[in-house]
Every structure is written in C-alpha cells, then in structure tokens.
Amino acid sequence: MKKQQAGILSIDVGGSHVKADVLDAKGKSLAERVRVPTPRPCPPDVLVSLVKEMVTGLPPFDRISIGFPGVICRGKVMTAVNLGNDVWVGYPLERALGQALGDHPAKLINDADMQGFGLIKGKGLEFVVTLGTGMGTGLFLDGELMPHMELAHHPLKNGKTYEQLLGNAAYEDAGKKKWNKRLHKALCMMNRLLNPDHIYLGGGNADYVDPDCLPENVSVGDNKAGIVGGAALWRNEPKARAPVSSRKAAKKTARKTARKR
C-alpha cells in the first residue's frame, strides 16, 4: 500500500479567531477545522503556544502555511494593528512556528493574500477584500500574487481609513444599512483605482453584505477560503531532495548491487 503523504497545516490568524486545519495538496480538508478565540492581549509567545495546543489532535503534516493580519516581509511581521502592533514589529513568526511545530518548513503571508488564493479563479486581474475585525486586501494577476498593498490603512473619507469605516467596530457603530453604503462607495473607489476584472469579498463580516449594494463585478466568497488558500503556497514547490548522507548511501548500495550482477 502506498504511504500517504503528510498534509499541509494551514493556520489563519484573525483579530477575533485563530483557525487551523490540515489540507491535502488541492486544499481539501483532512480533518475537522479547529477554531478558537484570539487571546487578548496576543503577544507572539501567546500565539505560538496557542497554535501548538490547537494542532495536537490534527493529522500529520510536513509543511505549514500561515496567514497573518498585517504586513509581512521575509517571514517577519512588520505590522499587526489588531493584535498589539509594537510587540509584533520585526517578529520572525514564520521561523518561530516552523520550529515550534516540529521543525517543518513554513511560509508566512498576509491573511487576505492567503484567503485570496482560496477565492480567485486565476484569470485576469482579481482583487480580494476581507471584512472582519479589520479589513484586508490582496491583488492577483493571472493567479500570481502581486506585491502586497495595505489599502485598509489608506484614507477613504474625511481623513478616515478604509478599515476605520469598514472594520467590525465601524459596523457595530454605524449599523448594517449605513455600513453597506460605505462598502459600496469603497468598492466603486477600488474599481476606479485598479480596474479589476473581479472583486471577491471574504471574512466573517462578509455575511452582513447586502447583495443589492454590490457592483456587477463583485461577489461574496466562502469564509473557509482563509484556510483553503494555504495549500496554494506549496503547489509550485519542487520536491524536497533527500539529505546528502542518504543519497550517498543509496549510490553505494547501487554500486554493490551492480557488482554482484
């Protein structure tokens, strides 16, 4: 019987919840997703310990994908507005979780970018907007992730940013009707700015979106995409080579076999 390949551990860190699941190479879940509230406060050591506890009952994995709500640069967190920014700046979360979870290779990207991989079709210019505790965005061209834009923290109206007008606090303060009007204005602005072929909405607060307030090229996606997108981070990876010692041993065995023949 062929040995089953270990899966991909996909971790979706959000301002309100942290989710984890193990996926196959196509993004299919191999277990029941684990979901727990995000601790408050949530410094790096608390998050790493929490994730270690979350994955104890999950199937085997040998690669790790992490979506994080902030700007990411070379495996390090550069901003984490909704998790206590200062303690996170410069933190090597990619390396820390890889080591803490069994010394497996890990990849860390912005959470909206990872969710985007689970939503896009891979054709043309596609834009992803996540609506939750905060707001995130991801831009893709023919399935390829473009350099990350933190559009959420750019001004939209009267000096207030997209996130200040569309984040969860804004939804609770303004109410559904007014929030949807703001969303429509923001989406029209994004269309003028980027001219995307399609815009996908994700995140927990996408459930509050009024379909009648959406431009024609906008649709609401499945919130599970934040986890599913983790599989895409490893699709173009070359197969790992065996350690040098193992390759040498294999060659030595092959030579012995040849001599016996």
Image (cartoon, rainbow, N blue to C red):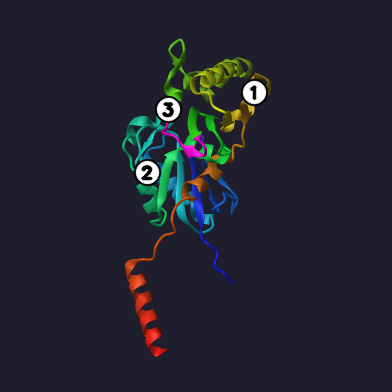
- Is residue 30 left or right of 44 when viewed as pictured? right
**Mark positioned earlier in the residue sequence (2 or 3):** 2
Which residue does the image show at 59% across and 37% down from the upper left?
Answer: 223
Q: What amino acid does circle 1 point to?
A: Glu
- Local secondary structure at mark 2: helix
Give the Cα distance between marks 2 and 3.
Answer: 19 Å
Q: Position of residue 123 (x, y in %)?
A: 56, 36
Name which of mark 3 and mark 1 comes first in the sequence. Answer: 3
For mark 2, what is the residue? 93
Magenta-span inclusion, residue 142? yes
Q: Badge 1 is on which residue?
A: 216
Residue shown at 33% from the left, 43% from the top: 92
In the rendered image, the quadrant that contains the N terminus is bottom right
Can residue 243 be seen in this snapshot? yes
Q: Which residues are magenta?
A: 141-149
Q: Secondary structure at mark 1?
A: loop
Q: Amino acid at mark 2?
A: Leu
